[in-house]
Image (cartoon, helix red, strand yellow):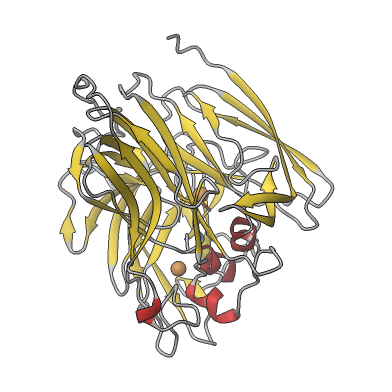
Amino acid sequence: ESSSAGQLQVELEAAPALVQLAGRQVSALAYNGSVPGPTLRLRAGDTLKIRLVNNLDQVTNLHLHGLHVSPEGNADNVFVPVEPGRAFDYEYRLPADHPPGVYWYHPHHHGTVADQLFAGLCGAIIVEDPVPVEASAERILVVTDTAVDSAGTISAVSPMERMMGREGGLVLVNGQSNPQFSARPGQRERWRIVNACVARYLRLRLDGQQLQLLGIDFGGPQDPEAVEELLLAPGNRADLLVTAQPGNAVLRAYRYNRGSMPGMMGPGFGQRAPQEVPDSIALATLQVSGEPAAPPAAAVAPQGLGDLRQSVVAAHRQLTMAMGMGMGGFTINGREFDAARTDTVVTAGSVEEWTIVNASPMDHPFHLHVWPMQVIEEGGREAGTPRWRDVVNVPANGRVKVRVAFEDFRGRSVYHCHILDHEDLGMMGVIDVR
Ligand code: C2O
Ligand code: CU
Ligand code: CU
């Protein structure tokens, strides 16, 4: 295959739409009439042009989550509002060495990000591998959750649910409830799972199958790692190889305790008592039967992003996420988001080490736009192998150290909690790389 740079032009219309979700007719918000929206397939070096047409009755815009592209002008600029009835022409140039992987897109207009995602606005992006991983099937599983009332409209959420981070009772894969896939014994499939939920963590298992992780968010330089369980915080993606074993296996999301605030009920419990919350939710079923397939060649993980552990660190910073009940609000370093203020100024081309502190009794998934983060220390331990993320979970009262190479692009962008209710409530800061 040739690796020559291409151009992709797409139109995404954000509009109210009647969609089938888990077999029900629901008045949702959708890109091009479907939840999730169309999958965008790109290659490193490509130019992507997206005309976003806003046929909602509210302001929106578009963010390409995880892509290493410019945050300025009409590229991945989250400060641009697209008014109702207007269109905006985005243009993104992927560097020739853009990391392959699964990414996603969603709105990013501060204050309504959680509402618009919960209503259905999201889609997957694939940046193809330069050398494809051999697999009999590639499946993209966009996991969303929402809540629908008896009239078929998306439920509004309470102030309490916003503070906790809303979790909808309807958990879907590609808009379906527990879709069925089939494979033959021995076949190797590639599953690319996007956690597109506003606030729900996905502690995933596919018992009875053989799983190898190629990476979370970005590929790693190490060999595929055998796993039984993996945790995807909101915003994370998994690139997983499934070698089919005979029988039926169910991909399940198990209950994950992400903490709480004193006086609040646990997340996802809604008005229910904890014992009424199911221990796990079936997301999808893999039925494996038929003639065994020839064993596939050993899998080679896509090229990773290198290693910053020996790099010269130009600056150390600490960012502290906190949630004050009533007073203080949802903050990073004591301040709520203000688009007019710049919180962090970074010298272009430098490597920085950030200690991200969680000063609250609830987990917060920390997300930085444009520049990938390498996890250096987590749970008090140094990371043994290079692990790259664009969302890194910071456990309740915990801390995580990351390094970031501020390469290739300059400009203003953001970092924030990817419990998008928290982001909308102010747990977001502005970075300027100059
Ligand atoms: Cu997926 Cu700033 O977001
Ligand atoms: Cu993002
Ligand atoms: Cu948070």
Q: Quadrant of residue 149?
A: bottom right
Residue 69, percent across and down?
Answer: 52, 36
In the image, is 355 to the left or to the right of 20? left
Residue 221, percent across and down?
Answer: 23, 32
Is residue 238 something that shows in the picture? Answer: no
Q: Quadrant of residue 40?
A: top right
Residue located farthest toward the bottom when viewing the structure as drawn: 263
Residue located farthest toward the front when viewing the structure as drawn: 290
Between residue 353 and residue 47, name the one nearer to us: 47
* Viewport quadrant of the N terminus: top left
Is residue 133 something that shows in the picture? Answer: yes
Between residue 17 and residue 42, name the one nearer to us: 17
Count of marks overlaid on the render: 0
Residue 21, percent across and down?
Answer: 60, 52
In the image, is 144 to the left or to the right of 279? right
In the image, is 384 to the left or to the right of 269? left
In the image, is 167 to the left or to the right of 226? right
Residue 97 position (above or below residue 172): above
Q: Residue at x 52, y 26 (%)?
A: 42
Between residue 419 and residue 18, name the one nearer to us: 18
Residue located farthest toward the top when viewing the structure as drawn: 2
Q: Residue at x 30, y 40 (%)?
A: 215
Q: Residue at x 58, y 45 (%)?
A: 36
